[in-house]
Image: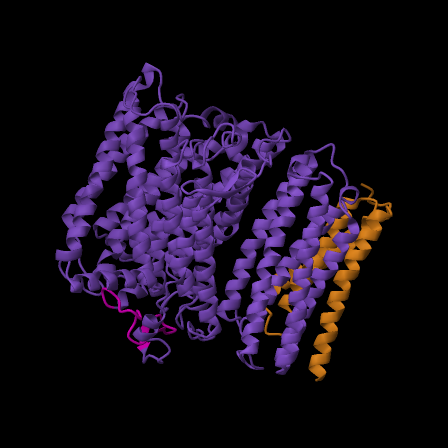
């Protein structure tokens, strides 16, 4: 039961991040907060895609995971981080499209 | 006709229509590809006959262009790769010590789709307006409905899409088989070169063919649904060239690699030496695989593409020759000081290396931008790629046919006739193709020419006649030997690889006992574990792959040969097409029905060294591979969007033309559908069937809601005049969201299947195969939407 709850929490958190990300993406574009919209959506999409892939490949105790692929995992983590940083930077004056 | 005779015929038909055994499928591939070789060869002969002297009128105008186009397409798509597939089907499982391919039914489906695609391409000759005539590269705008009238090109397009589907299925099968089903001790380092090259070939197929599918799909829409992707003034013809050559250049290596693998194995066997620097060759081929996706622009140097891009791709094109030079040198060094046995396969292998040096060297010229501009539209290029495709690849495949003939048939061929075949073929090929390098100023694809080119063309035609006639020898030799040749021993060549350690021909289940390679490289056979037997294969005969393909054939024929029921845009929906779709759907349902009742189960291979898919069962591995291909399909279409978007000055932001609320609602629905699906997975892992069913019903309802919202949205857009005629923005929107919607739609029966299986008690806490795999598919659908939503609603 403990494991079920823990997994449920991870699933729900991932779902919330994805849905929340989409809503924020729309709000930021519509209100002009994203100064470079193309770069911003690329960052958000990259973040969401990496998150989904990491979710499927490395769920806690899940047999779904493609094991023994540390390089791919590392790349996905880098993509996740890069997506997050890119989308934030695209909303700052430092990178104005 | 006696009843016994009829029974024999029906038994024969039933056996071959329903077989799923890899050796049977391999034989079917080999025989069918040889048939298409004869078709393509006959077309090539007609072309050469026309070019014998200036002013000939054997084939002129569009007839000539049709012959040239279909000669190229049949040779490349329906002969060379399928012959390699046939050999790989037969040999690879034997070489790695497996009982069969990972997915025998998919393997049968691959073959039948291949056959049907070839038949549809053949039928296109008889379509009103003729068949495709735009050249094998199908350059835009020659393929538009202005320059290519009639339905022939549409049939060829359909044939290419079906063939690509067949290739994709084969890709999944071979990758999973080689990764997951190698015998104990068959490490990656010990994998024979032929199997290694099949790994690289299918990886290339996996990444290249989705681009071809996407490109031809857009062409189909242009010709039948009024879109204008390839006729757009915003670089429509560039777009085709980019998409086609992103597929087209890797395709060269898809054709080449299996032949190189065969040559490497043969040279090692008949030199009595281990292949020199095998690990360097493998490294070289992996580099070649990666680099092959970075050189496509050299086919577009004359299109006026940016100089910076030309410089970069000139460099990558020059360096892609390095891995192949390394391979050739390693093969020559293997021959050096070897105790060479000049058999027919060895002669073809050595001839192939010789031709590779000529074909490769003339290709390096084309990496130079100025030289490429001079040579691109001339017979120099034609000579270069014919040396590669015929001189190297066809020679390599012929070597393979001779080499494995004793293993496949259990009979020896006539060695003297084989050697005569080699001598004639080797001499005539130079007479056929060498003059083309001296025709470096003669434009290609012309049916009449200036008198100063007459001598070279005459020499070439004489060479073609001799070369073509030389193939009568193997036809006679191998056919006769099949019935009357001396019995072949198990290992007539004293070869090193595993396929020679079983009988000739091998038994249905390949080996008596389980092969295992010990740490010192010896092969031992341990008693069979009972997991496989001859009877398993008999039970696994199925008509469904044939049924699905037959449906596709009827659908294709229906496009031109049937009364029209109704018309959508320019596409006639006919009675025969509808029947075809029904046959396909019924066959698919039968397939699912068999699965639902566990009627086609194959024991999972033992968990061995199978990086990078350790711990993942073979079905799930196959789904991962399939999804990689799907990513390339959508990646190509998203790339198309980017290509058009960056060229358009009048692009209206998405939120001005589309209702962003609808987009957000659908995003929420799709994410939540996947969430519920995964909840179902969590429930079944707890053993809760009711939880699984409830979650699946929710997921199903949400997917249907997604589609309904899409229908409402499309209806509204059409009602306010936002149609395919509105422009490229609308065409991209309908195409991409439509294709994505089709993927969502396919998720509906998939979830319904899970529900049906759960209801009949097919899942338990421990055993719930299929649930995760469909979940992965939905994850992919979700990921694509992550890109489509901002592309069409926000930007």
Q: Is residue B520 found inside the magenta-colored segment of the image?
A: yes
What x and y, as percent, mark residue B36? 32, 44
From the viewer's perspective, tell me whether residue B419 is left or right of residue B319: left
Residue in the image at 61% along x and 49% along y: B635
Q: Is residue B462 found inside the magenta-colored segment of the image?
A: no
What x and y, as percent, mark residue B570? 54, 37
What x and y, as percent, mark residue A75? 65, 59
Residue B328 appears in the rendering:
no
Residue at the limit of the structure toward the bottom, as seen here:
A1
Placement of the C terminus of chain B among the 4 image quadrants:
top right
The correct choice, above or below, for B396 with respect to B584 in the image is above
Q: Looking at the colours in the rendered structure, which chain would you say is drawn in orange?
A: A
- Residue range of the region highlighted in magenta in the rendering: B503-525
Q: Which one is nearer the viewer's eye here, B473 or B276?
A: B473
Placement of the N terminus of chain B among the 4 image quadrants:
bottom left
Residue B577 appears in the rendering:
yes
Q: Which one is nearer the viewer's eye here, B443 or B220?
A: B220
Q: Give chain B's shade.
A: purple
The correct choice, above or below, for B296 with respect to B457 in the image is below
Q: How is the image coloured?
A: by chain
Residue in the image at 30% along x and 64% along y: B499
Residue in the image at 31% along x and 75% along y: B535
Q: Which one is nearer the viewer's eye here, B50 or A39?
A: B50
From the viewer's perspective, tell me whether residue B52 is left or right of residue B194: left
Q: Which one is nearer the viewer's eye here, B413 or B185?
A: B413
Residue at the limit of the structure toward the top, as seen here:
B451
Q: Main secondary structure of the magenta part?
A: loop
């Amino acid at each position: 039961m403990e494991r079920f709850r823990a997994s449920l929490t991870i699933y729900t958190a991932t779902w919330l991040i994805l849905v929340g990300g989409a809503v924020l993406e729309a709000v930021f574009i519509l209100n002009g907060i994203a100064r470079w919209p193309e770069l911003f959506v690329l960052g958000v999409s990259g973040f969401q895609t990496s998150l989904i892939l990491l979710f499927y490949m490395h769920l806690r105790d899940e047999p779904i995971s493609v094991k023994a692929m540390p390089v791919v995992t590392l790349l996905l983590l880098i993509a996740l981080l890069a997506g997050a940083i890119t989308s934030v930077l695209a909303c700052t004056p430092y990178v104005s499209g | 006709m006696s009843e016994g005779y009829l029974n024999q015929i029906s038994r024969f038909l039933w056996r071959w229509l329903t077989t799923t055994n890899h050796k049977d499928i391999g034989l079917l591939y080999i025989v069918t590809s040889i048939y298409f070789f004869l078709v393509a060869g006959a077309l090539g002969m007609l072309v050469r006959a026309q070019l014998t002297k200036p002013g000939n009128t054997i084939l002129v105008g569009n007839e000539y262009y049709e012959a040239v186009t279909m000669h190229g397409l049949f040779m490349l798509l329906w002969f060379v790769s399928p012959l390699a597939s046939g050999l790989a089907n037969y040999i690879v499982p034997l070489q790695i010590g497996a009982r069969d391919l990972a997915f025998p039914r998919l393997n049968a489906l691959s073959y039948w789709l291949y056959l049907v695609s070839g038949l549809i391409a053949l039928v296109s000759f008889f379509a009103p307006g003729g068949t495709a005539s735009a050249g094998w590269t199908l350059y835009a705008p020659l393929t538009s409905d202005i320059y290519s009238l009639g339905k022939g090109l549409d049939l060829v397009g359909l044939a290419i899409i079906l063939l690509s589907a067949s290739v994709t299925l084969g890709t999944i099968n071979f990758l999973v088989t080689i990764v997951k089903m190698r015998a104990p001790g068959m490490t990656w380092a010990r994998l024979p070169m032929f199997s290694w090259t099949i790994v690289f070939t299918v990886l290339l197929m996996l990444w290249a063919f989705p681009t071809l599918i996407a490109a031809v799909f857009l062409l189909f829409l242009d010709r039948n649904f009024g879109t204008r992707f390839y006729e757009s003034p915003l670089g429509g013809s560039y777009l085709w060239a980019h998409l086609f050559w992103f597929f087209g250049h890797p395709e060269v290596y898809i054709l080449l690699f299996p032949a190189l693998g065969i040559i490497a194995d043969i040279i090692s066997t008949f030199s009595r030496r281990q292949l020199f620097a095998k690990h360097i060759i493998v490294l070289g081929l992996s580099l070649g695989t990666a680099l092959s996706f970075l050189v496509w622009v050299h086919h577009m140097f004359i299109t006026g593409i940016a100089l910076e891009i030309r410089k970069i791709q000139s460099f990558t094109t020059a360096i892609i020759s390095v891995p192949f030079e390394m391979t050739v040198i390693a093969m020559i060094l293997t021959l050096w000081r070897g105790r060479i046995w000049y058999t027919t396969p060895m002669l073809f292998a050595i001839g192939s290396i010789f031709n590779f040096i000529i074909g490769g060297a003339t290709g390096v010229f084309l990496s130079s931008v100025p030289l490429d501009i001079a040579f691109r539209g001339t017979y120099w290029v034609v000579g270069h790629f014919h040396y590669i495709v015929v001189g190297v690849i066809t020679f390599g495949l012929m070597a393979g046919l001779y080499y494995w003939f004793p293993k496949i048939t259990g009979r020896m061929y006539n060695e003297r006739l084989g050697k005569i075949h080699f001598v004639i073929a080797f001499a005539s090929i130079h007479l056929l193709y060498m003059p083309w390098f001296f025709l470096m100023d003669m434009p290609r694809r012309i049916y009449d020419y200036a008198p100063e080119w007459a001598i070279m063309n005459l020499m070439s035609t004489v060479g073609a006649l001799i070369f073509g006639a030389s193939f009568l020898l193997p036809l006679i030799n191998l056919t006769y030997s099949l019935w009357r040749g001396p019995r072949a021993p198990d290992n007539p060549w004293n070869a090193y690889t595993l396929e020679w350690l079983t009988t000739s021909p091998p038994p249905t289940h390949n080996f008596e006992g389980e092969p295992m390679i010990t740490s010192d490289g010896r092969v031992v056979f341990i008693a069979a574990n009972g997991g496989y037997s001859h009877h398993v294969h008999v039970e696994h005969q199925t008509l469904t792959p044939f049924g699905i393909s037959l449906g596709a054939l009827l659908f294709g024929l229906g496009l031109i040969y049937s009364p029209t029921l109704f018309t959508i845009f320019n596409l006639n929906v006919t009675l025969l097409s509808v029947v075809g779709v029904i046959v396909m759907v019924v066959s698919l349902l039968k397939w699912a029905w068999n699965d639902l009742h566990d009627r086609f189960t194959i024991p999972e291979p033992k968990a061995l060294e199978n990086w990078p898919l350790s711990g993942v069962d073979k079905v799930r591995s196959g789904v991962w591979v399939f999804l990689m291909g799907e990513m390339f399909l959508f990646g190509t279409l998203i790339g198309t969007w980017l290509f058009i978007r960056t060229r358009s000055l009048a692009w209206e932001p998405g939120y001005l033309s589309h209702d962003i609320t609808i987009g957000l609602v659908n995003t929420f629905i799709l994410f939540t559908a996947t969430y519920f699906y995964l909840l179902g997975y969590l429930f079944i892992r707890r053993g809760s069937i009711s939880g699984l069913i409830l979650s699946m019903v929710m997921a199903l309802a949400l997917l249907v809601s997604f589609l309904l919202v899409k229908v409402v949205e499309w209806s509204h857009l059409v009602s306010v005049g936002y149609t395919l005629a509105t422009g490229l923005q609308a065409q991209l929107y309908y195409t991409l969201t439509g294709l994505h919607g089709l993927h969502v739609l396919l998720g509906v029966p998939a979830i319904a299947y899970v529900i049906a299986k759960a209801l009949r008690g097919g899942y338990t806490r421990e055993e719930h195969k299929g649930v995760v795999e469909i979940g992965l598919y939905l994850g992919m659908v979700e990921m694509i939407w992550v890109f489509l939503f901002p592309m069409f609603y926000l930007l």
